[in-house]
Amino acid sequence: MEASPQAYARIGGALYLIIIVFGMFAEGFIAGKLIVSGDAAATAHNILASPSLWSIGLAANLIIPVLAVPLLLIEYLLLRPVDRNLALLALFFNLVSLAVEAVSKLFLLAVLSPLESAQYLQAFDPQQLQALAYLAYKSHDVGFNIALIFFGCTCLVNGYLIFRSGYLPRVVGLLMQAAGAAYLTACFAALFAPGFYDRIFPVILLPPFIGESSFCLWLLVKGVDVAAWKQRTARTRSEVVRPPLAAASP
């Protein structure tokens, strides 16, 4: 890591960009095209009419947490010189977020099962099967919101570390903290105050888009101030290895 923080920054930026694009494609375009809110029959019809599109969305959804694992390691390595304990806290928040998100994708995989023509499904009528498929999708939404609560905490901590770093722009740190606050507001509202969520959606998603895109593009295009990063790293090491005061003679 000490040899080339810039390389890690560029790799992290590229991974982040892919995650953002895949997320917008899967959760924005495909879900927006196939899912009809509150209408299980129309949703089932759309998915059965475009099974390939649904499968592509599933693949994108599964790739995202896979790419996020090396990204969170890179973020930890880049921000560790600021405060190792807080960088670890952000790492743990992110790990929990990814674990919950990965589990939530099981419900997406379960959406198609009730809509298939398997023999055992003939015990249910079509409306029941459509309701089961829609329920699986809504269960994914619940799990995904829980995952984003932990990710919102990650953004708050990382934003603070970016702000204090000296080798990344302070404004990016503030934007990441705004993203974290927006994630927490949106997800708690979606889970516990859906009426309020309907009033703030989709405007509430603007801070996360701006904050994460800014961090992603800065890493990809500009990277870190290597001289400042090395200076911060050297200062942190000197604080860690500083010898204790000699014990007083009796």
Image: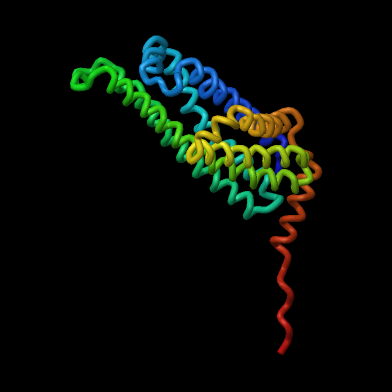
- The residue lying at 52 percent from left, 29 percent from top is 64
Pinpoint residue 91: horizontal percent, then vertical percent: 57, 46
Determine which quarter of the picture holds residue 119.
top left
Q: Position of residue 240 (x, y in %)?
A: 69, 61
Q: How was this image coloured?
A: rainbow
Name the quadrant of the N terminus: top right
- In front of the other: 115 or 195: 195
Residue found at the far bottom of this picture: 250
Say which quarter of the image contains residue 128.
Answer: top left
Asked if one can make out residue 10 in the rendered structure from this viewpoint, the answer is: no
Q: Quick one: 88 or 208, which is closer to the camera? A: 208
The outermost residue toward the right is 227
User: Left or right: where does residue 212 sit relative to residue 68?
Assistant: right
Q: Residue at x 29, y 19 (%)?
A: 127
Residue 168 in sight: yes
Query: In the image, 32: left or right of 154?
Result: left
Would you say 56 lies left or right of 238 here? left
Q: Considering depth in this image, is 113 or 102 the residue closer to the camera?
A: 113
Residue farthest to the top, as pictured: 49
Image quarter in which the C terminus is found: bottom right
Q: What x and y, as percent, mark residue 110?
A: 35, 26
What's the residue at 49%, 44% (across, down)? 96
- Tell me the residue at 45%/19% (across/down): 36
Q: Tell me where residue 152 sits by quadrant.
A: top right
Q: How many marks?
A: 0
Q: Position of residue 135 (x, y in %)?
A: 36, 28
